[in-house]
Image: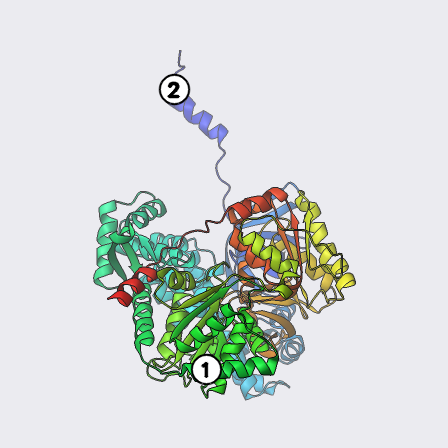
Amino acid sequence: MKKIIPENAFMNQISQATPPAAPEISLQAEVLTVTFFNAQNGYAVIRVKVRDEPGTITAVGHVLRVHPGEMLRIFGLWKEHPKYGRQFQIHRAEPLLPAGINAIRRYLASGQLKGVGPVLAERMVKMFRDKTLEIIDTDPKKLLQVEGIGASKLEKILKSWEEQHHVRALILFLQEHDVSPALAARIYRHYGPESMQKVRDNPYELAYEVHGIGFRTADAIALKLGFAQDCPQRMEAALIYLLFQCGESGHVFCPQDELIQKAQVLLEGADESALQDALDALAQRKRVVLEELGAQGLGAVVYLGHFHRWEKEIAARLRALSDHPAAMDKNKLRAALSELEARRRISLSREQRQAVEDACLNKVFLLTGGPGTGKTTITKFIVDAMSLLGLKIKLAAPTGRAAKRLSEATGSPASTLHRLLQYAPDGGFALNETRMLKTGMLVVDEVSMLDCQLCLAVLRALPLTSRLVLVGDVNQLPSVGPGNVLGDLLKSRTLPSAELTRIYRQAQESMIVVNAHRINQGLFPHASPKSAPQADFFWLEQEDPGLVQDMILQMVCERIPASYDLNPRLDVQVLTPMHKGEVGTQQLNVLLQERLNPRGREFTLGLRKMRIGDRVLQLRNNYEKEVFNGDLGWIMDVDIEEGEALVEFDGREVTYELTEMDELTLAYAVSVHKSQGSEYPAVVMPLLLQHFMLLQRNLIYTGLTRARRLAVLLGSKKALHIGLKNAKARTRYTNLAHRLMEIMNS
């Protein structure tokens, strides 16, 4: 029988079981050291000095990126950590100006004010004592009395000081709405002094305008600001966000039913009719395009407006380029090829000669094939034959490393597509449909990496009188960006093409080449009949992730350099399917950095420790710097006082502000996706069952074919078998093949 408890007794039980929450404490703290900082979410562990507290205390929680010497008003509670003892748990933090000579000196010496380092900080404090910050704020011209501060230096200091004022105000505003202060600097970097007004007007714009802020963060801000859960802005923002997410997964559109379902999950049960109304409103404003693709069995689909324009325009421009006449004398071409064969003492096979002739005679031509099939030989013959016939030829590839390889293979200069098309500061290309390339033929290599946006930029800049040769390997991973350009062009069967399948005798001696083709057929790789240093391929079986990690470190740092006379920092690249785990990029980079660059001068960015001499990888396209997603570089120098770092990419030095260094990550180990377009003397690639979600045949194939002299695959035999069987890479929602078939056959 259920026992009935009187109301007053019940309340007594509740009060005994759940003691009232302790009142929030406020402390004024000076930051002494930053033990840990996560740049992604603002979580920090800091040592601070607090009045009436002996010694120093540890404070943990979400704060803005802080530096020694800064003053904070921190709100929170004391907690007893089972391992680390008494800590102050920060609920929110307000930045304050430091007080006292020592605090001001530490603050200025931290490099937070651009242009001021330890030496200049000492001089400023020596002259102005505890009035230093007040001088900067109210009478900055007095700073010109300090040795080392001229007009340009003063301008830099004041600009940095003003930015900090705006960021502090934005932090306080965001914290009123329980938003992490780590986002403030990122929002300010995008909007500048208008940041607060932009956030107030429509925080949902943050989701697709500010890098690193997704829909969920923008939604949290909006709801705190009083936006209703069923407001049109929220519905529309969710749909646009999901379409952008589809684009990041390589899709050009999303089936409408699937999009609505995803939006209902994201918005936790939003009304379907309200989402449909939002979709119709977006279509009316041309932010999205609704289209019926019944012939493809997809029904109603939704495109972002610009994705739809890209796809249609690519098909139209390929048709126009293919149809525009540009005569080529077949007899002269054949004579040129014979002359080149005689010069080089090379006799092209029938397959190779036919591919060269077709590439030169047609306006658009696709050349595909795996390693060892003669793509490089054919490309060089195409370039040299057309040059003999007087055509001006341009060579390009999506990445700097791929362009360098193309140049080495052909003996002719090659550039990145972005440099060829002259990327402009406004976000477009200087060469386009109004100012075109001056060339009779454009050869583009590594076309599997070409997404819709870059493909269209190429076609816009190419005169109709020119020829276009696209070279690639359709079995590699597709582009990072939206679309499946090479696959769709081949699938449409509307453009002349040659697929090379024969492995030539010299290439048959390479187990890298042989095993790449076996993997592409779903077959287990063969062991090399040779031993080191003649062998170019090894498969090492080991199931335990910890032991695989140890083997990778030993291979990269000791065994491969000793046996193959390779520099472990320059020549050996670890490729791995994942970022997390014992053999993920994150952990391997820390371990390899310690082994390969232990004495480089160190500086800290958030929780990351970087050193001069480190190998680094660019994480996203930076058009202004002409550095692109996947480019490898080296940290050459860092100037904390100026807030800058110098990074070299293929012989070109690029300056980064330290606030921009989140675009770079350590690159001793990189993901297979980021290695596309690159080639390395030696590759070490682990494959384990913990990689299950990413194990695909084309991923293993792509990783293996990045190796030029040596490839070492190691890990679980079962994991390798799973990857070999998984030939169904995720289907991308694209419609370019059908558009080409329609327009070419009309």
Is residue 60 positioned above or below 689 on the image? Answer: below
Task: Give how far across and how far down residue 617 sits, in percent.
Answer: 58, 66
Image quadrant containing the N terminus? top left
Left or right: where 162 falls relative to 53? left
- Residue placed most toward the observer, 372 or 6: 372
Q: Residue at x 60, y 87 (%)?
A: 145
Which numbered circle lies on residue 27? none
Residue 349 position, x and y percent, is 54, 70
Q: Is residue 14 above or below residue 184?
A: above
Which residue is nearer to you in this view: 485 or 627? 485
Disc number at residue 6? 2
Mark 1, residue position: 333
Residue 52 in sight from this viewpoint: no
What residue occupies the far right of the structure in this picture? 562
Quarter holding residue 670:
bottom right
Indicate the secondary structure of the residue bearing disc 1. Answer: helix
Task: Name which residue type carries label 1.
Answer: Leu
Residue 231's spot in the image, x, y percent? 26, 52
What's the colour scheme?
A: rainbow
Q: Quadrant of the C terminus?
A: bottom left
The earlier-in-sequence mark between 2 and 1 is 2
Element type where label 2 sits in the image: loop
Q: Quadrant of residue 79?
A: top right
The kind of residue tagged 2 is Pro
